[in-house]
Amino acid sequence: MNTEEQKLRLHSKIYVCTIIVGLTISGLTAFPLETEMVYLVKQSAFLPSSLQIWLGAVYKALKNTNLHYPFLSYGTDWLAFAHIMLAVLFIGPLKDPIKNKWIIDFGIICCIAIVPLALIAGSIRHIPVFWQMIDCSFGIIGIIPLIRCRINIKKIEILEKHYGLWTL
């Protein structure tokens, strides 16, 4: 393996680790939603009033729902679990990016799909546009390391093919 390929593999690992960490944090933060909302509401004085009102409404809804219908939060527990399991899925490209490039492609598709989901479901559920944009940003930001990783994988494949021909 030449130094260019080693560099590409290292950068790919960094990109994949970024996705793993992001998914894991997203998953772990989906468990204590009511606690997080209390904190956000208490710290929201510096935010625009429309966001303060929105966060307050979300907190009240979560508190009321958890008080009267705690079983509904089981859905966000499964959301958290899904995020963590998706993070585990990305261990494949961490170990062998060429063999597991389909997982990177899957991640890119997921990032693209976030945008229409956030806009369509957000509109149906009366989520404020600024919050829909925050949700869209996860797909837009997440796709960057995935595309860079996919480009590196293509380059590694080319290098392996090139150097493989020289060794024949």
Image (cartoon, rainbow, N blue to C red):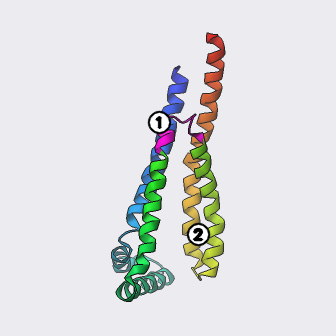
Q: Quadrant of residue 26?
A: bottom left
Front one among 53 and 62: 62
Q: Amino acid at mark 1?
A: Lys
Q: Quadrant of residue 100?
A: top right
Q: Position of residue 79 (x, y in %)?
A: 47, 66
Q: Is residue 23 left or right of residue 105?
A: left
Check the image and report above or below for 21 versus 115.
Answer: above
- Assess whether residue 93 is covered by the magenta stretch: yes
Q: Residue at x 43, y 86 (%)?
A: 61
Of labels 1 and 2, the one closer to you: 1
Give the numbered dot on residue 95: 1
Q: Position of residue 159 (x, y in %)?
A: 62, 24
Q: Residue at x 51, y 29 (%)?
A: 7
- Assess whether residue 99 is covered by the magenta stretch: yes
* Residue stretch rendered in magenta on the structure: 91-101
Give the numbered dot on residue 133: 2
Q: Position of residue 18 (x, y in %)?
A: 46, 48
Q: Are marks 1 and 2 in contact (CB under 8 Å)?
A: no
Q: Amino acid at mark 2?
A: Met
Q: For numbered disc 1, what is the local secondary structure?
A: helix
Neighbour class for label 2 at 10 Å: few (<14), some, many (≥20)?
Answer: some
Check the image and report above or below for 68 versus 102.
Answer: below
